[in-house]
Image: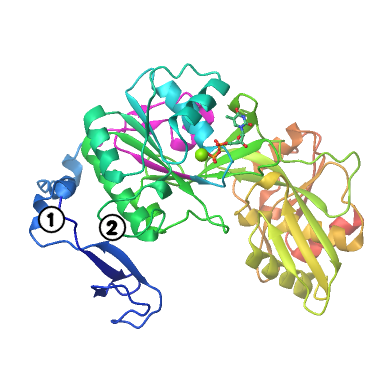
Amino acid sequence: MAKEKSIYTCSDCGGVSPKWLGKCPSCGAWNTLVEGIAEVPGASVKNSRYQALAKSQPVATLSEIEAADFERTPTGQEELDRVLGGGIVAGGVVLIGGDPGIGKSTLLLQAIEDLSHKLPVLYVTGEESGAQIAMRSRRLGLAGSKVRVLAEISLEKILATLEAEQPAFCVIDSIQTLYSEHLSSAPGSVAQVRECAAQLTRTAKASGCAIVLVGHVTKEGAIAGPRVLEHIVDTVLYFEGDTHSSFRLVRAIKNRFGAVNEIGVFAMTEKGLKGVANPSAIFLSTHGEPVPGSCVLVTLEGTRPLLVELQALVDSGGPSPRRLSVGLDKDRLAMLLAVLHRHAGVATNDQDVFINAVGGVRISEPAADLAVLLAIQSSLRGRPLPKGFIAFGEIGLAGEVRPAPRGQERLKEAAKLGFSVAVVPKANAPKKAIEGLTVHAVERIEEAMDLARGL
Ligand code: TYD
Ligand code: MG
């Protein structure tokens, strides 16, 4: 096939240039030109790669379109099915990201083995050799007899194999190792990742094969390469967790076939990842006695409440004190510290403040605010919160404590696990007393801080 011509498109304004330039000739932005394939008008439609998009569909009235529910095939990994919304969907494309060594290949190998008993499957590996996959499969104790493996990084060859093998489920491990012969940039570059993902997505939609793309993440934790990848695919899953501990979370960030923010919890064992069906208490560290700077939060991830220990360390800082957070938003921490100072009179402006969510969980819900500030105050005073203490609630800039969704469920879960004292927003106070749990309802941050000092 004749080599197609490249053009360079500005990711800001869409302006094009025939060669790469540091500065966009149209809008003047720096470093925004990205390589792509020049499409010859007319020819592109005939080009088989675009046929999936070119098929014309009649216009129909919405009410006449049959809304058949997607047929899902369970992967056999219950926790994975939970985040996928029940299983894989024909033609669906899933992107799964996570730090190196967190268990992406392990989980997918376990899932593909299960699926191979029901469907024709293909495992494409660009990172490891077939022998390495076989070794992992033996280690996991899987027979692997029906899993077809292809060690290949050329997109064109992979597409040809998909055409020949006609699998119903295919894993691409990983998208950053693939390259298309039509582009001159290196594998893993923005242009290559985008082109390969787009072509595989087209193939999935046209053939009905469900495809899982493994994606590397950057230091900041986002999928490496273009953000646009997340727009192309149907479902985006992220692996979270501390590679030093054995627990792993898989979270749905986007899901066209199910609920978002649902999580699956796994434990990494000698024989691969095992689902944890009842995970509520795994993110608590094990202190014999309460320690200063620690507060347990009841967070709600997807459909299940989780108890997570938040730790704060407040220590006298230098001329420009540092605010660092692991697992929580740093900007939100700065905002909370300002509210704490202004409304509750607790000053930390000459202190370093560090906060950490135990176990490598990432907490994005604002209901963590109250627990963060209680942990900070506890560390500042050097006094622990009482034994069996939990808190949750969002804090506003005016110092008000706002309710968290589904407060009753959170309180019940905490009581079930033996927690005995709770500080919660007024609107979350239970109407009927919960056995074994003393609930203090607060409306303002200063009220919560005063109350915690007296406990
Ligand atoms: P892997 O799935 O290769 O990670 P990724 O594809 O996300 O880079 O996981 C590798 C890690 O998991 C490695 O440190 C070894 C560990 N592991 C186990 O603890 N038990 C197992 O059964 C397997 C297969 C791996
Ligand atoms: Mg891997």
> Is the residue marked by circle 2 packed among few (<14), some (14-19), or many (20+) residues within 10 Å?
some
Q: Image point 44% across, 23% down: which residue?
A: 113
Amino acid under disc 2:
Leu
Amino acid under disc 1:
Ser
Residue 125: which quarter of the image? top left
Image location of residue 106, percent across then percent down? 53, 32
Judging by the rendered image, the residue that carries numbered circle 1 is 44
Does 253 appear above or below 340? above
Specify whether tag 2 is near ligand 2 (CB below 8 Å).
Answer: no
Is residue 227 shown left or right of residue 365? left
Element under label 2? loop
Image location of residue 369, percent across then percent down? 69, 58
- Whether residue 431 is visible to the viewer of this picture, yes or no, is no
Judging by the rendered image, the residue that carries numbered circle 2 is 183
Q: What stretch is highlighted in magenta?
A: 67-96
* Figure quarter occupied by ligand 1: top right
Residue 63: which quarter of the image? top left
